[in-house]
């Protein structure tokens, strides 16, 4: 478990490093504080016709003083942005993810009860961790599904990654649980996230869409493959297991259940997200000459003026509009979208991009190696 | 379909607060403070009211480098809607002492 923990820590460190590298220096801490960044991220969840409301929230937060007051206001707005309709077709996809997570959790409980597995304090701890993982993937999915252009490539990519793992795992329940290693199709596990990252980036036209699609594909594949694995354990039990090692049925089933969670809710997402992320970044770097520099989008100005709110409303003149390109909140929105502001110099950004790409490549390679080390001999 | 659904009590409170001075533009935070709503409740209500045409909104140009601020007031249909509401004495909105009322009359 330690290599996986190490990868997780390194991944978090890289993400923080990247955020810091790509961040624009804030001359006013108040407008670049955590509530403002959080709200800047959350308004990106709103449907296109609601973007003006997101700008309204940002404008209101900008005038608030006091850390506690700003936090309260920002958190309330985040909640509103998350649930504010319309959700469109994202509801259907989220329902599918929810069904997968619920079925997997239910099957795990059923298996535990059916095979009379032992219950102690650790069981509850691990059950809590399992629920947190499942809920985490659902939350991530619900956020990513609302991002424009992400749902299609993300869901298709998730199915593709899941199919690759099923092929590598041998498809049948017996081979899934009892074969050691992944056979001769290990390369599929490496290829699938690359294909998803490259395909989603080309589909969406930016590294941001590619990375988000990879994350959605990761969540989808994790839930799908975990469901398949738990189903295999529930149906197969200890059948096909070599009894010469002296393990009881309950021990075998318990071990198999734990392996499903460790491999497919932790290892699979780590590997898929890391490799896919690197592939998306590399594709954007190679395909688009300046992936980090994109023209300012109309998001900087309230879309359609007030007409987005009500046909009867008034609006200020666009030329007198104070939405500036260098405003931190809006700039942050662009950063989160992967299309940073023009105010950052091109050359440093290129260096940073290369640096991030190198880190991605190193991480992907280490993740793949550690994963192979884990999966090679089944520890039983 | 959604237009025919009755407004919630909170939405009616917002409408009544706006109707206290129908011609004055109000900021979202001030409105939330006045009707004792959190931002997470206020903005969905404002969206709903605007979708129904009961609310009109405008942007207040802010200082250099600051984002604009959104302001709200009742539209014509909104005023008619409030006028058609039964006089409810039960809903008394007490202004808070530290309320930051908007000085937006210049945008009338």
Image (cartoon, helix red, strand yellow):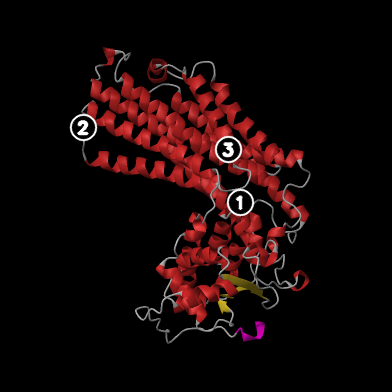
Residue A300's image quarter?
bottom right
The answer to whether residue A332 is left or right of residue A93 is right
Magenta stretch in the rendered image = B104-108
Quarter of the C terminus of chain A within the rendering: top left
Q: Residue at x 51, y 39 (%)?
A: A93
Residue marked by disc 1: A18
> Earlier along the polypeptide chain: callout 2 or callout 3?
2
Identify the residue at image location x=23%, y=31%.
A113
In the rendered image, the quadrant that contains the N terminus of chain A is top left
Above/below status of A21 relative to A106: below
Q: Which residue is mark 2?
A: A118
Residue B21 is one of the magenta-drawn residues = no
Q: Nearer the viewer, residue A1 or A68?
A: A68
Whether discs 1 and 2 lie on one chain: the answer is: yes
Looking at marks 1 and 2 on the same chain, the residue that comes earlier in the sequence is marked by 1
- In terms of secondary structure, what is the magenta stretch mainly? helix
Q: State which chain disc 2 sits on.
A: A
Q: Secondary structure at mark 1?
A: helix
The answer to whether the residue labelled 2 contacts the one labelled 3, judged by CB atoms less than 8 Å apart, is no
Q: Residues within 10 Å of mark 1 (few under 14, many from 20)?
A: some
Q: Which residue is mark 3?
A: A154
Residue A150 visible, this angle:
yes
Q: Position of residue A258 (x, y in %)?
A: 34, 31
**Real-space Cα separation, disc 1 to disc 3, in angstroms:** 23 Å
Assess disc 2: are there few (<14), some (14-19) or many (≥20) residues with their C-alpha within 10 Å of its C-alpha. few
Tell me the crowding category of disc 3: few under 14, some 14 to 19, or many 20 or more residues within 10 angstroms, Cα based: many
Q: CA distance from mark 2 to mark 3?
A: 38 Å
Quick check: A103 left or right of A192?
A: left
């Amino acid at each position: 478990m330690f290599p996986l923990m190490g990868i997780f820590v390194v991944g978090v460190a890289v993400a923080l490093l990247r955020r810091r590298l790509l961040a624009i220096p804030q001359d006013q801490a108040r407008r670049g504080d955590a509530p403002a960044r959080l709200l800047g991220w959350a308004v990106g969840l709103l449907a296109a016709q609601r973007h003006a409301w997101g700008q309204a929230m940002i404008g209101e937060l900008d005038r608030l003083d006091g850390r506690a007051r700003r936090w309260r206001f920002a958190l309330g707005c985040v909640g509103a942005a998350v649930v504010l309709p319309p959700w469109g077709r994202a509801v259907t996809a989220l329902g599918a993810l929810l069904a997968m997570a619920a079925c997997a959790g239910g099957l795990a409980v059923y298996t535990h009860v059916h095979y009379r597995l032992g219950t102690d304090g650790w069981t509850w701890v691990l059950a809590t961790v399992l629920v947190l993982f499942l809920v985490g993937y659902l939350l991530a999915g619900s956020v990513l599904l609302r991002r424009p252009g992400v749902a299609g490539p993300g869901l298709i990519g998730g199915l593709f990654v899941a199919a690759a793992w099923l092929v590598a795992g041998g498809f049948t329940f017996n081979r899934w649980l009892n074969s050691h290693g992944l056979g001769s199709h290990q390369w599929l596990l490496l290829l699938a996230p690359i294909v998803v990252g490259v395909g989603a980036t080309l589909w969406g036209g930016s590294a941001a869409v590619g990375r988000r699609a990879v994350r959605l594909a990761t969540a989808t594949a994790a839930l799908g493959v975990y469901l398949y694995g738990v189903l295999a354990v529930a149906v197969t039990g200890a059948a096909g297991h070599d009894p010469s090692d002296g393990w009881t049925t309950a021990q075998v089933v318990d071990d198999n259940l734990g392996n499903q969670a460790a491999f497919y809710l932790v290892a699979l997402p780590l590997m898929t997200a890391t490799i896919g992320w690197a592939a998306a970044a590399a594709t954007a770097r190679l395909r688009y000459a300046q992936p980090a520099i994109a023209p300012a989008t109309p998001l900087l100005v309230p879309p359609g003026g007030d007409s987005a709110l009500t046909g009867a409303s008034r609006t200020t003149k666009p030329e007198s509009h104070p939405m500036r390109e260098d405003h931190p909140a809006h700039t942050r929105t662009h950063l989160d979208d992967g299309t940073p502001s023009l105010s950052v110099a091109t050359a440093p950004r290129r260096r940073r991009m290369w640096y991030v790409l190198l880190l991605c490549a190193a991480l992907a390679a280490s993740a793949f190696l550690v994963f192979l080390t884990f999966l090679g001999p089944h520890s039983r | 379909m959604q237009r025919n659904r009755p407004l919630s009590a909170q939405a009616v409170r917002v409408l009544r607060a706006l109707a206290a001075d129908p011609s004055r533009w109000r900021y979202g935070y001030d409105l939330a403070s006045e009707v004792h709503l959190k931002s997470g409740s206020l903005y969905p209500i404002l969206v709903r009211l605007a979708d129904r045409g009961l609310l009109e909104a405008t942007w207040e140009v802010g200082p250099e480098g600051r984002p604009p601020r959104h302001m709200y007031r009742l539209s014509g249909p909104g005023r008619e809607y409030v006028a058609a509401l039964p006089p409810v004495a039960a809903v008394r909105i007490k202004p808070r002492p530290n309320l930051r009322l908007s000085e937006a009359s210049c945008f009338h």
